[in-house]
Image (tube, rainbow, N blue to C red):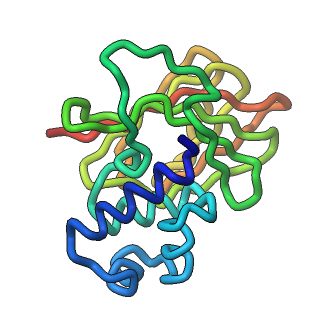
């Protein structure tokens, strides 16, 4: 199943479970009613930040919008993880493992083109983010501080606050990210 349809099905289910109109959901998450309509129809691929706004508005983990049935043992490939893009197509996000009722974390791989930045609006309250650099260099800006990480280095921080990534080197930044949601 295509990622657009998975997101469409999950968004509609979550909205209906909460007995919300598209207008009410638009107010909750700060995304236009028209955009939500197109996402629910599966006719658009929402950006990463749009998905975070929706998740935050619904007070659910990001990957609840990406959930699909997975058998107990399953090999995940980059292709099967599904790619999401930012507004300028310089940031690519692959969701390998979404948050589920039995798993209170999300596991992503990101790619960010050299010299490019990605702004995150922050995630759910009390969430934590763990980043491990696979290749390239990351400059993470968090609460006015800049942290530079190189391959095989990692960082953990409060993910509920806005933060930004900069691919500081000459190579594409590749990293894994785990977003953890304490019970």
Query: Could you tell me which residue is drawn at 62 percent across and 47 percent down?
Result: 84
What quarter of the picture does the C terminus occupy?
top left
Q: Is residue 154 above or below residue 181?
A: above
* Position of residue 130 in the picture relative to residue 181 (left or right): right
Query: Could you tell me which residue is drawn at 61 percent across and 35 percent down?
Result: 110
Q: How many marks?
A: 0
Query: Could you tell me which residue is drawn at 62 percent across and 26 percent down?
Result: 78
Q: Position of residue 176 (x, y in %)?
A: 53, 27
Q: Is residue 4 above or below residue 23?
A: above
Q: Position of residue 1 (x, y in %)?
A: 53, 41
Q: Position of residue 112 (x, y in %)?
A: 71, 40
Q: Nearer the viewer, residue 163 or 25?
A: 25
The single residue placed furthest to the bottom in the displayed view is 23
* Position of residue 102 in the picture relative to residue 3 (left or right): left
Q: Nearer the viewer, residue 81 or 152?
A: 81
In which quadrant of the rendered view does residue 137 lie? top right
In which quadrant of the rendered view does residue 130 lie? top left
* Position of residue 119 in the picture relative to residue 7 (left or right): right
The single residue placed furthest to the right in the displayed view is 170
* Position of residue 39 in the picture relative to residue 182 (left or right): right
Q: Position of residue 42 (x, y in %)?
A: 56, 61
């Amino acid at each position: 199943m295509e990622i657009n349809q998975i997101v469409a099905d999950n968004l509609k289910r979550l909205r209906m479970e909460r007995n919300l109109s598209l207008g009410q959901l638009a107010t909750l998450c700060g995304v236009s009613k028209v955009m939500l309509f197109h996402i629910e129809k599966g006719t658009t691929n929402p950006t990463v930040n749009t998905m975070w706004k929706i998740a935050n508005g619904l007070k659910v983990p990001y990957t609840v919008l990406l959930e699909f049935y997975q058998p107990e043992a399953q090999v995940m490939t980059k292709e099967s993880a599904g790619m999401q893009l930012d507004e300028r197509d310089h940031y690519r996000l692959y969701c390998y493992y979404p948050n589920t009722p039995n798993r209170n974390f999300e596991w992503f791989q990101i790619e960010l083109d050299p010299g490019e930045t990605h702004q995150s609006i922050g995630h759910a309250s009390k969430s934590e983010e763990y980043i491990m650099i696979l290749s390239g260099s990351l400059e993470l800006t968090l609460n006015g501080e800049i942290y530079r990480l190189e391959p095989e280095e990692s960082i953990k921080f409060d993910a509920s606050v806005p933060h930004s990534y900069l691919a500081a080197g000459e190579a594409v930044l590749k990293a894994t990210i785990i977003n953890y949601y304490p019970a």
